[in-house]
Amino acid sequence: MIQQQYPSQLLEKAVQEFSKLPGIGRKTALRLVLWMLRQDDADIASFAEAVSKLKAEVKYCKVCHNVSDSDICPICADHRRDQTTVCVVENIQDVMAIENTQQFQGLYHVLGGVISPMDGMGPADIEIDSLINRVGEGEVQEVILALSPTMEGDTTNFYIYRKLAPLGVKVSVIARGIAVGNELEYADEVTLGRSITNRTLFEEK
């Protein structure tokens, strides 16, 4: 394949950086960079500031590990929500997907990944211990396992269930309205909402 030639090294460097973004190839990166060149200086400065402040100032909630502007995220800080129910998800996108359904009024716990030996991810690499400690404090009565129905998600569900078993807390899993192998964040809101509402007790197989 012939390497595309750029008339400017600055242009080429910008394309290289944009192409590092997930799902962005070099052609798309070039279109984005050329679009940015046509924008006002103020708009580009605002864009750069937003990205810089995001990295420098964003926090992770000390309770659930969701992104936040403060040490405790707005969901955990909202005492109107059900403090006795915690929904365990893989990532921040899953929190937003479930919130969009408006079918869940409890709290969340973001693992930051799933157990995947192939990817070098073990239980110690994700937020499982903090979940066990959180449940161990006694206020949580139900833990909903809302991980994607993949082999890695099921493995993580089983591991968490076994760790929670001695604590006597109710453990449920979302209904399989989500097709096996699909990522939770891409499910439509109606299907995802029903999966939360129609959750069932986790059964060890």
Image: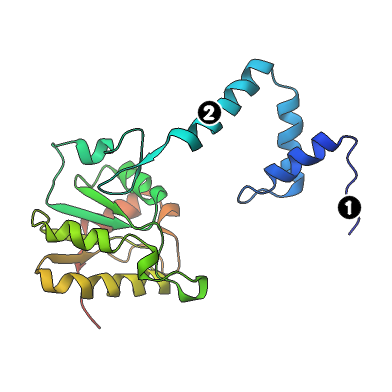
Image quadrant holding the N terminus, namely: bottom right
On screen, residue 99 versus residue 161, left or right, reads right
Where is residue 61 drawn, in percent x and y? 31, 43
**For residue 3, which numbered disc appears in the image?**
1
Q: Residue at x 50, y 30 (%)?
A: 53
Say which amino acid is labelled 1: Gln
The crowding category of the residue bearing disc 2, from other C-alpha atoms within 10 Å (few below 14, some 14 to 19, many at least 20), is few
Residue 174 in sight from this viewpoint = no
Q: Residue at x 11, y 56 (%)?
A: 137
Mark 2 belongs to which amino acid? Ala
Percent across and percent down for residue 97 are 37, 47
Measuring from the top left, give residue 119's x and y in whole percent.
51, 70
Q: Please determine whether, in this image, residue 54 is positioned above or below residue 61.
A: above
Question: Residue 135's quadrant in the figure?
Answer: bottom left
Q: How many residues crowd around disc 1 within 10 Å: few (fewer than 14), some, or many (20 or more)? A: few
Residue under label 2: 50
Relative to 123, 80 lies left or right: left
